[in-house]
Amino acid sequence: MMPDLSLMVRLLAEEAEQTNRSPLPMYLMIGVIGLLWVVIMWLPQRKEQQRTQAMLGGLKKNDRVLLSSGIQGVVMQAQSDDTYIVVRVDESTGTKLKVLRSSVVRVVDDEKDA
């Protein structure tokens, strides 16, 4: 018994008509995924960058800082428009380093660290 070829073609054609749907749900899903990416990834990163820029812009003389190299020191010279700051790293000898402002990881708070 061979199946009727015309019946198979008709069934396949009906199935093809049913799967010919609008691509709108797919585009909506892509849009939702993009929106989630913005909310989950981009906005928190932007807030962190703003906090870092505010911290670097607010550096002033006598602030204790931690550099990205792990060195702790005291800011001796920092103008708000300057790329570099001068940090004293040894109080007994008065050793100073001129470093990039962006190498400051955080301002060390003596009360919190004690």
Image (spheres, rainbow, N blue to C red):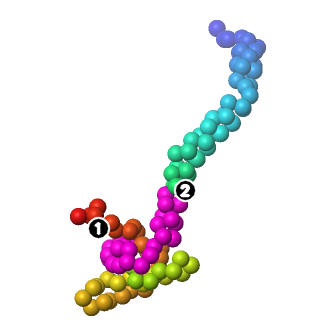
Q: Is residue 26 left or right of residue 98?
A: right
Q: Which residue is mark 1?
A: 110
Front label number (2 vs 1): 1
Whether residue 5 appears in this view of the structure is: no
**Farthest residue, direction bottom:** 93
Whether residue 65 appears in this view of the structure is: yes
Q: Is residue 4 left or right of residue 101?
A: right
For the residue pair 59 and 102, the one nearer the viewer reads as 59
Crowd class of label 2 (few under 14; some 14 to 19; many from 20; radius 10 Å): few
Residue at 69% from the left image edge and 36% from the top image edge: 27
Picture coordinates of residue 68 (x, y %)?
Answer: 38, 72
Residue 46 - label: 2
For the residue pair 79 and 85, the one nearer the viewer reads as 79
Q: Eyeballing the image, is 70 above or below 93?
A: above
Element type at marker 1? helix
Residue at 59% from the left image edge and 40% from the top image edge: 33
Look at the numbered discs 2 and 1 and tell me whether their residues touch, using CB distance below 8 Å: no
Picture coordinates of residue 102 (x, y %)?
Answer: 47, 73
